[in-house]
Image: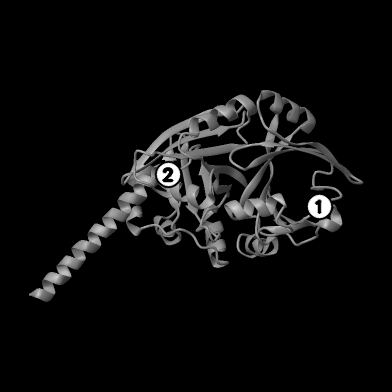
Amino acid sequence: MHINGIDHLELYVGDARQAAFYFDTAVGFRLRGQGGPETGLAGQRSLLLAQGGIRLLLTTGLSAEHPAATYVHRHGDGIAVVALAVDDAAGAYAELVARGATGVTPPRTFTGPDAEVVLAEVGGFGDVLHRLVERRGDRDAFLPGAIEPVAAPDGDALLAEVDHLAVCVPPGQLDETVAHYEKVFGFADIFTEHIEVAGQAMNSKVVQSPDGRVTFVLLEPDTGARPGQIEDFLRWHAGAGVQHLGLRTDDILTAVGALAGRGVRFARTPGAYYDDLEQRVGRLDAPVDRLRELSILVDSDHDGQLLQIFTESMHVRRTLFLELIERRGARTFGSGNIKALYEAKERELAAAGAGSAATAGGVGA
């Protein structure tokens, strides 16, 4: 079995048209296909969006019994299927089940005039499935006979590919999740870290497919510390799931400027974060003032630098959000920014406190 990267991601959402409008008008994805009962997709509506090498399938269940409706009721909108490109879907399915994966959907074939697609599904983490996708013939024919192609103008392709998925798991499940991906999928544990700041803490491990094209950043809360954002996600999402989707761009300055202009809301970075940025990460290729203006973060490792920024969640439960990331050699995921952001916020608060005290003293005089 050989995994050739991420074929697509399927999001189960309460309203596929509304979700597609956001991803199209704000994030720059373009509609490439659609399907429903009339195309053989019983009980659902699905819209296929694409940008660069990223394909998102947005699916809404049309009845309370549909898996998409059940998922949304429990978890809210989110990534429910991570589809993996393989050479032989039937063979991969049999091999994964033999290694201990939970078989969910046996292989089935979709055939069109110029293409044939074989799909099978196995369990992943939490309620998230892995779809095995084998494509023959026209690779742009997404799902012959089920998803009808839609002709739409090309966008500006600011986003290139899926860089990674960050996955939160409940306490005590990190090691077993890593072991599952090592044993069943042949992934490697490439990075381990314990992150602690401001009384909050988490354990993180990164697993990656042999060719490096599929990467999961697995996060587990440290129950010995005070609750933080990982616990918040697990509570509001009702269990393990994809916390954020990392999308790689070749020009993060342009991408962030364009997306912000279309209404994407990005997390703001304290101005003090940039005061000692070059001392922490080394010489920058991008102007610090422009990074500060856009709230873009910078981190470094032995291989180079990475620039990253996170969107605010677009969901009512404030769970799934996006990360834009530009890699300038760096192979890690910006964990150094967690501590730097906290320390920057502390400096700003201290400066504001000192200013308030000085003002109060002046008034008293």
* Residue 311 percent coordinates (x, y): 51, 57
Q: What element carries label 1?
A: loop
Sequence-wise, the earlier of marks 2 and 1 is 1
Q: Are the residues tagged 2 and 1 within 8 Å (C-beta)?
A: no
Name the mark on residue 227.
none
- Left or right: residue 337 versus residue 178 is left
* Residue 333 percent coordinates (x, y): 48, 41
Name the mark on residue 299.
2
Image depth: mark 2 or mark 1 in front: 1
| Residue furthest front as drawn | 65
Q: Quadrant of residue 360?
A: bottom left
Q: Is residue 275 visible?
A: no
Residue at mark 2 to residue at mark 1: CA–CA distance: 44 Å
Relative vertical location of residue 8 with respect to residue 312 in this rendering, above or below: above
Q: Mark 1 points at which residue?
A: 41
Amino acid at circle 2: Asp
- Left or right: residue 178 versus residue 299 is right
Residue drawn at x 60%, y 24% as measured from the top left: 183
Q: Nearer the viewer, residue 281 or 109?
A: 109
Amino acid at circle 1: Leu
- Left or right: residue 207 versus residue 101 is left
* Residue 216 percent coordinates (x, y): 56, 38
Q: Nearer the viewer, residue 223 or 331?
A: 223
Q: Which of 345 and 223 is in front in this view?
A: 223
**Way the structure is coloured:** one colour
Question: How many residues crowd mark 1 within 10 Å: few (<14), some (14–19), many (20+)?
Answer: some
The quadrant of the rendering that contains the C terminus is bottom left
Residue drawn at x 81%, y 47% as measured from the top left: 143
